[in-house]
């Protein structure tokens, strides 16, 4: 069963955004590491899907959605590098945390548990990201699109017809950055 966690309608100068984030459940395990946000100043929208196998994935997704405009300050590579540096700083801090292992198990088991926990900490704070920035013109709207990972961007016209999908473009292992996707206003 899926329940809506957040449903928000925002409007800017002629623009509306709706973000809906639904936690999912896989068996007994709750999957709640997705985040979405529209930042009216700057007209930036972002979706992040925390990597399930990564500790603190929800926190990573929340962090990236909160600082999404940084992604567009100097271009995709520079903006993404800045955000990655921030996530790595959080990871390093998390790796310094004291590991809680049970005292009632043997020293050998405690050593093994610490090694497993350290390995998990080393892969913490991972998320995918898909972000857009709208650039309104006099007769059209420019759109910058940036993505890293398997999150996608879809744009629809008012009647619900699909205008653009990033899934129709080849995947790369590096951040994608597209400029010049224009929609008539």
Image (spheres, rainbow, N blue to C red):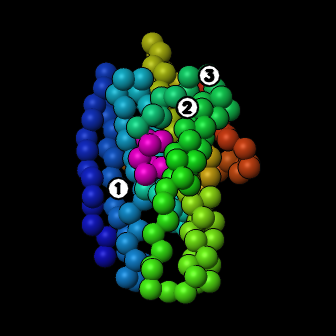
Magenta segment includes 144:
no
Between 4 and 74, the one lying in front of the other is 74
Q: Is residue 17 left or right of residue 98?
A: left
Label 3: which residue?
74
Point out the frontmost of discs 1 and 3. 3
Q: Which residues are magenta?
A: 59-65
Which residue is located at x 49 percent, y 56 percent? Answer: 97
Give the answer, above or below, for where 73 lies relative to 181: above
Of tags 1 and 2, which is closer to the observer? 2
Q: Label 2 belongs to which residue? A: 71
Mark 3 residue crowding within 10 angstroms, few (<14) / some (14–19) / many (20+): few
Q: Earlier in the sequence, mark 1 or mark 2?
A: 1
Quadrant in which the N terminus appears: bottom left
Q: Is residue 138 above or below residue 168?
A: above
Q: What residue lies at 37% left-to-right and 37% top-to-bottom? A: 38
Residue 145, quarter of the rendered image: top right
Mark 1 and mark 3 lie on one chain; the one further toward the N terminus is 1
Q: Give the residue pinned by disc 1.
A: 21
Give the dominant element type of the magenta stretch: helix, strand or loop: helix
Q: In the depicted view, which residue is nearer to us: 109 or 173?
A: 109
Q: Are marks 1 and 3 in contact (CB under 8 Å)?
A: no
Give the percent coordinates (x, y) of residue 6. 27, 53
């Amino acid at each position: 069963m899926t329940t809506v966690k957040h449903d928000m309608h925002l409007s800017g100068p002629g623009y509306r955004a709706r973000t809906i984030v639904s936690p999912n459940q896989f068996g007994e395990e709750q999957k709640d590491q997705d985040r979405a946000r529209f930042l009216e100043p700057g007209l930036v929208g972002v979706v992040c899907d925390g990597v399930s196998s990564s500790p603190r994935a929800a926190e990573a997704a929340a962090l990236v959605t909160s600082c999404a405009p940084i992604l567009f300050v100097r271009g995709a590579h520079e903006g993404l590098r800045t955000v990655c540096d921030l996530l790595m700083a959080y990871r390093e801090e998390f790796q310094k945390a004291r590991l809680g292992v049970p005292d009632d198990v043997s020293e050998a088991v405690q050593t093994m548990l610490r090694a497993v926990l350290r390995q998990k900490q080393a892969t913490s704070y991972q998320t995918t990201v898909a972000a857009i920035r709208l650039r309104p013109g006099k007769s059209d709207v420019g759109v910058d699109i940036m993505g890293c990972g398997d999150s996608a961007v879809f744009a629809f016209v008012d009647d619900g017809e699909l205008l653009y999908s990033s899934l129709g473009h080849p995947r790369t292992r590096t951040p994608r950055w597209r400029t010049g996707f224009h929609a008539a206003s």
